[in-house]
Structure formats: C-alpha cells, structure tokens
Amino acid sequence: MTFFPIYLALGAVAGLLAGLLGIGGGLVLVAALAWLLPWQGVPPEAAMHAALASSLASIVLTAAASARAHHRRGSVLWPTVAWLAPGMMLGGWLGSRLAIALSGDVLRWGVAGYCVVVALELLRPRPATAAHATEAPRGVGYSLAGVGIGAVSAIVGIGGGSLTVPLLIWRGVTPVRAVGTSSACGVFIGLASAAGYAMQAPAGALPLPGAVGYVYLPAAIGVALTSILAAPYGTRLAHALSADALRRVFAGFLLLVAAGFVWR
C-alpha cells in the first residue's frame, strides 16, 4: 500500500501552519509519520527516529518556501538570521547525534512533553506590548541561543519556530517579522539536523528502498512537494488575520497529539 497521497496531504497542512504561525508543522508531521511509517515497513523501534529525520528533511523546503514568501513582504530580518544560523546548525547536528543514541520510547515521551509545552505557550494570554526593536537584533548571544534551539529542534523534529518566534518577540521584533525570520532559520536547522540523522545513523538503520540513514526520502519528498505550495498561503493569512483563535484551536490539537503519544 502506498502512503504517498497521505504524505502530500500532510505536507499541505505543515506548509500552511509554517507560513501562518511559524510553529507546529513539524510536530504534526512527527506524530503522523510515527504512526504511518511502521505500515511502510519501518521497524517499530526505529519509527520515531525515522519520523523525526523525515520531518526535518521536509522542513528544509517548507521553511524555504515560507521564508521566500515572507522575504517578498519584507518580514525576514536577515542580519538576525546570520547570527542565529551558525549556532542552530551546530545544535541541529549535535541534537540529532543525541537523538540517535536515545530509544524510541524516550523520544516519544520527549515529543509528547514538548507538544504540551507548546500548547500551553499558545494558550498563554499575550499582553498587548508595542514592538521596540528599531533594527534587526544581532550579536553572539543569538548564536549561543541558536545552539540550544537547534538541538531541541533536532530532538523533537521541528524547524525551531516555537522557540525562535517567542525569543524574537521578547527582543522587540514584531510578530510577523519574528515568524518570517524564524522560517528562514528553519532552513538551516532542517539541513543540519537531517544531515545528522542521515550521516550519523547506524548502518542499515532503515532497511527500506529510498532510505538514507534515518531519513525516509519518499515521505520527506511527498511532504515537501505540497508544503512548498501551501506555505505562501499561510503567509498571506499571517499578514491578514489575527491568529488568536487559530492558536487556541491548534493548542487543543497539540494536546490531543500529546495524548496520542502517551497512549501508545
């Protein structure tokens, strides 16, 4: 049975979320892939690793499409990206190395816990505060923060938006620019993390055609094909709509995802 049409549908959802909220697409992918991949012949003990790796590989193109759309609207702070990206790439590589050493059950509980944390952050009341940054934030502190963001992102299979966006908003960046900048950073996190899962995996990690280390290319490519088409629509909505109601709905969905991981 082929799951390629399902991967295409997942990509559309992930791309829309990446452009709209800057967060969440990766968590949706990891949950779905962890359930689907064993039906494709992925050994159960490797399913979480493969889900994380394949999600991160697809995020490269998803984030690139979202960043391109935000760049056209002037909402990517490239000097900030330049300071964040080196640390994020180092963190992504190291995080994937750590994840490979962990069992699937530990990763499953880690992703479930992270879903809860993100859901609570989405539900937290946001006081109306005016953005105060007059120029793109920069400095070595952002590179150091990038290491942590990249490492966590690699372990839970995301593009880092749920960490990068709050950091930039806290530093006075407007929300839409924080989302655009985070999207650009997601390209670097995805590249380094997916490469780590591919190159540091044990030999024969996934005994399937189309697998490179823990990256299952049919899933990653299927997701990416539609995510790059859907991301610009999410970006348009991000510039046109208030995301408060969508945040609440998505927070509830993430809590259900977490419950699913715990139940399994």
Image (cartoon, rainbow, N blue to C red):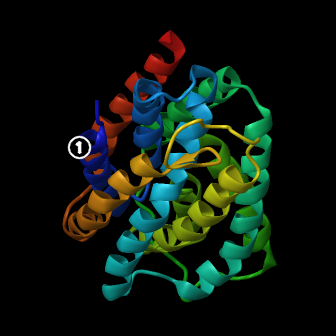
Residue indicated by mark 1: 5
Identify the residue shown where x is 42% and y is 30%: 40
Residue 167 showing in the rendered view: no
Give the amino acid type for the residue marked by disc 1 in the picture.
Answer: Pro
Where residue 156 appears, x then y in whole percent? 60, 41
Relative to 76, is 216 above or below? above
From the viewer's perspective, is residue 213 above or below residue 77? above
**Residue pictured at 42% horizontal, 67% vertical:** 61
Residue 166: x %, y % from top left: 54, 58
Which quadrant, please, contains the N terminus? top left
Residue ID at (57%, 61%): 190
Identify which residue is drawn at 76% across, 41% down. 202
Classify 10 Å Cα crowding around label 1: few (below 14), some (14-19), many (20 and above): few
The quarter of the displayed image where residue 160 is located: bottom right
Which of the two residues, 145 or 245, is positioned nearer the viewer here?
A: 145
Residue 120 horizontal/vertical position (percent): 49, 34
Q: How many marks?
A: 1
On screen, residue 145 versus residue 217, left or right, reads right
Where 255 sits versus 139, above or below? above
Depth order, front residue of 165/110 = 110
In front of the other: 251 or 171: 251
Horizontal placement of 237 versus 77: left or right?
Answer: left
Residue 244 visible in this rendered orientation of the protein = yes
> Is 107 left or right of 233, judged from the image as shown?
right
Nearest the eye: 211 or 148: 211
Instruction: For mark 1, give the secondary structure.
Output: helix
Is residue 185 placed above or below 250 in the rendered structure? below
User: At which x and y percent is residue 17?
Assistant: 33, 53
Toward which corner of the image does residue 194 lie, by quadrant?
bottom right
